[in-house]
Image (tube, rainbow, N blue to C red):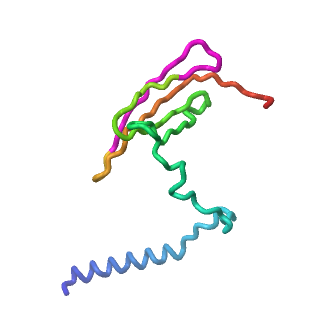
């Protein structure tokens, strides 16, 4: 064995030793006293009706509505169409309003190895009227 390979082995051993010492010295502590209960309900069965594909050849699936900005007067509406891009227009209006507004969505897909996603639509709607209800 040459002195160079012996030196390399010694360095590797020293690094492993150092990592072992660091692991022993580190203590992440406890972040919370919460422990998940053992009396949890069973998972939703895979044959539940909520997992059925909606009828129609290109019906929107996986529809999500999320908060669209920090002020709370916007939403993001997202949905997936499986076969081809669907309509990218979202129509919306105020309750009892005569005129209707519309917003256009962007459409994307992605690929990973042999997987290709459906057509993912994202529509941002801003400047919505915020109504605060004091009495329900």
Please tell me in which quadrant of the rendered image residue 34 appears: bottom right
Front one among 73 and 85: 85
> Looking at the picture, how far across and down is residue 71, in whole percent?
61, 30
Front one among 105 and 85: 85
Q: From this viewpoint, which residue is outermost toward the right?
A: 135
> Looking at the picture, how far across and down is residue 128, in whole percent?
59, 23
Q: From this viewpoint, which residue is outermost toward the left?
A: 2
Placement of 52 over or under 26, stated as above or below: above
Indicate yes or no whether the magenta region holds residue 131: no
Name the image quarter holding the N terminus. bottom left
Placement of 16 over or under 89, stated as above or below: below
Instruction: Say left or right for 133 vs 66.
Output: right
Placement of 99 over or under 3, stated as above or below: above
Q: From this viewpoint, which residue is outermost toward the front?
A: 55
Placement of 24 over or under 84, stated as above or below: below
Instruction: Say left or right for 130 vs 87.
Output: right
Q: From this viewpoint, which residue is outermost toward the bottom?
A: 1
Front one among 26 and 32: 32
Please tell me in which quadrant of the rendered image residue 59 appears: top left
User: Residue sitting at 47 percent across and 30 percent down?
Assistant: 123
Indicate yes or no whether the magenta region holds residue 100: yes
Instruction: Tell me the magenta residue range.
Output: 92-110
> Looking at the picture, how far across and down is residue 31, in whole percent?
64, 62
Instruction: Say left or right for 52 vs 86.
Output: right
């Amino acid at each position: 064995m040459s002195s160079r390979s012996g030196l390399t082995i010694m360095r590797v051993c020293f690094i492993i030793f150092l990592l072992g010492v660091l692991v022993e010295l580190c203590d992440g502590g406890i972040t919370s006293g919460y422990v998940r209960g053992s009396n949890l309900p069973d998972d939703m069965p895979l044959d539940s009706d909520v997992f059925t594909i909606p009828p129609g050849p290109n019906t929107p699936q996986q529809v999500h509505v999320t908060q669209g900005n920090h002020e709370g007067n916007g939403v993001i509406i997202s949905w997936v169409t499986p076969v081809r891009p669907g309509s990218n227009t979202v129509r919306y209006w105020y309750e009892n309003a005569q005129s209707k507004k519309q917003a256009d969505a962007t459409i994307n897909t992605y690929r990973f190895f042999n997987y290709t996603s459906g057509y993912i639509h994202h529509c941002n709607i801003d400047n919505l009227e915020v109504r605060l209800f004091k009495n329900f």
